[in-house]
Amino acid sequence: MEGSAFAADYPIVTVEQSANQIQRFSNGSTDWNGTPDWYWSAPDGDASWIGLSDVKRRSTAKWGYVSLCTASGTASRGGRAAMIRESDKAVVWTAVVPGNPHSVERIENHGAIVTACSRARVFSSSYQSGGGINVFVPSTHGGTPPTAYGSSISVGFPDAHGVLWDKEHELLLATGLNELRAYRLVTNASDIITGLTKVASVTFGGTAHDIQPDYASANVFYTVGGSVNPDHGIWQATPAYDAATGTWSLASPTKIYDWSFTKSFGRLPDGTYFWVDAPSADVWWNDTVGFSGRADSVRTGARFYKARYWSHVFT
């Protein structure tokens, strides 16, 4: 696997489920024991915060840099989506989201928060089949998103696991059962989001988990799970627009690694790949974040679920 590490110090942010924290480390170190460079602990005593499942750094006009996060929670209580202000670690926005939320994103210039949930978005004694995307849209530009789940825009997508805003193309990319989708925003005369329109997709067999930008190219990476499923592995595709036909595509989907249980996969601006690869279908975490071109980074006893480049930009 190509890629050089240690050429630059690119911070890596993780969701770590043993301590239930967001934790940031340097990619210039293989020993991640000790106190992280930055961390935030999910609140105790509320089941909706159990199992942090995603983190992304974003820049806002109102709160400065924030860490977006989701937590899976429980079937009866629901899970969480939140924005954490990095300067003082304050929770500046949060909502209870049913259906096992796996991923979160913020749509820049609209201030909307998007979640992807793998199960039916209902409160019940046990999880039910289903899943989908919810968009929490402020009523005015510069406003705060609503906190009531019932006030969000709901779009069905079975087993939805990942969501990413592509600012360059103004596409909302999402992963789920048998499909990678690209949505365009539907807005009203005041440029307030009122819905989503699917404009492109890539189909395959299995559930696609994570989706991340490639910080060294125009591609995006998405992971498809399963050891039996022939489409499992790490894939890349390129969002593209054909001006002649007025159509969008997710061009040249290509499998680049034949891995089975990868929870997140990305590439840093210097070309270094990094990932969290779970050991089996029944164990969704690892104490190790892998890097190409150098030894992996390890935190003893950790349960890393996802790792991200700590950047608020897409490329």
Image (spheres, grey):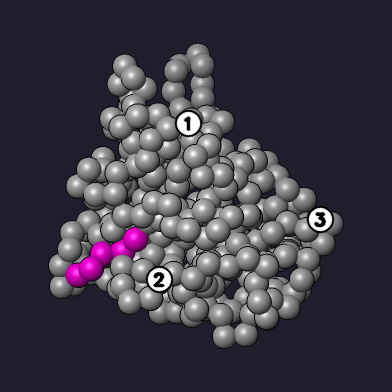
Mark 3: which amino acid?
A: Ala
Residue labelled with disc 2: 43
Q: Amino acid at mark 1?
A: Asn
Residue 102 is situated, as x and y percent measured from the top left of the image, at: 39, 60
Q: Is residue 22 above or below residue 146?
A: below
Callout 3: helix, strand or loop?
loop
Could you tell me residue 2's position as x and y percent?
A: 77, 58
Residue 143 percent location from the top left of the image: 38, 35
- Residue 96 in the magenta stretch? The answer is no
- Quadrant of the image containing the C terminus: top right
Q: Where 91 sits versus 201, above or below?
A: below
- Residue lying at 61% horizontally and 42% vertically, measured from the top left: 313
Residue to which mark 1 is pinned: 109
Magenta residues, dominant SS class = strand
Give the CA separation, mark 2 to mark 1: 29 Å
Left/right of residue 83 with respect to residue 176 in the rendered view: right
Circle nearer the N terminus (3, 1): 3
> Is residue 78 covered in magenta?
yes
Secondary element type, mark 1: loop
Which residue is farthest left? 124
> Can you tell which of label 3 and label 1 is closer to the viewer?
1
Which residue type does callout 2 highlight? Pro
Magenta region: 76-80
